[in-house]
Image (spheres, rainbow, N blue to C red):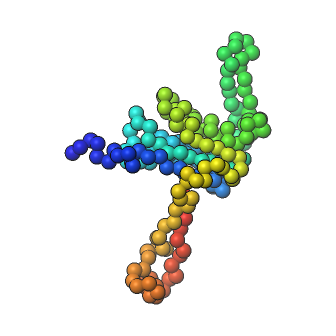
Amino acid sequence: MSQVLGRTNLAFSRAWHVVNVGADSRSLGRLATSIAVTLMGKHKPIYHPSNDCGDYVVAVGCNDIRLTGNKRDQKMYYKHTTRPGKGFKQMNMERVFQKFGGGEILRRAVSGMLPKNRLRDVRLARLKVYEGLHHPYKKNIMVMEAKSNRRGPIGPSYGPVGAPNNNHNNQEASPPLAIE
């Protein structure tokens, strides 16, 4: 079998994904994990650690990010300016929120979940974060919300259009589910 099966230009094309951070029920860490997987391209069947095949992610509504516990007050961010003596700087998450916004919190969380190699900065550059719900990439996004045609626990009924629903036990079919 060929090793290049499926490795076409279409497979390596980059899609654009939108994540509404404020409306998402996941906490910061779980959200950052799924964003990191998308940036690396691990959701694609052609993934290889040395190839950069990840997609773009646009995160909107970062000012309403969900945190658990007392992280806003207790979590500290550290950096060093490389100057001896007074180069060590630290600030808590609340101060980072005030100074840089929630987008910087999400960017740092995703950065910590990406592999520490030369592709890290390239992958992180494909993450676009915005405090509000508006962003300039609306033309790049093909599908904002995917719909499923799955209906209820039994499944859809098949037949001609306009035919009555033949679900067992005369249950009403639920409307299509939104997949995120």
Q: Is residue 65 visible?
A: no
- In percent of width and height, residue 119 lies at 49, 32
- In percent of width and height, residue 139 lies at 58, 53
User: Residue shown at 71%/17% (left/top)?
Assistant: 87
Question: Left or right: where does residue 40 sit relative to residue 26?
Answer: left
Seen in the picture, residue 100 relative to 64 is either above or below; the reply is above
Q: Which of 166 and 122 is in front in this view?
A: 122
Seen in the picture, residue 29 relative to 161 is either above or below; the reply is above
Q: Which residue lies furthest to the top in this view?
A: 84
Quadrant occupied by the N terminus: top left
User: Residue shown at 53%/76% (left/top)?
Assistant: 174
User: Residue shown at 71%/46% (left/top)?
Assistant: 131
Seen in the picture, residue 58 relative to 78 is either above or below; the reply is below
Q: Nearer the viewer, residue 22 or 138?
A: 138
Q: Which of 33 and 135 is in front in this view?
A: 135
Number of numbered discs present? 0
Q: Is residue 120 visible?
A: yes
Question: Left or right: where does residue 28 sit relative to residue 53?
Answer: right
Quadrant occupied by the C terminus: bottom right
User: Residue shown at 55%/40% (left/top)?
Assistant: 126
- In percent of width and height, residue 108 lies at 62, 36
- In percent of width and height, residue 101 lies at 73, 40
Q: Which residue lies furthest to the left in this view?
A: 1
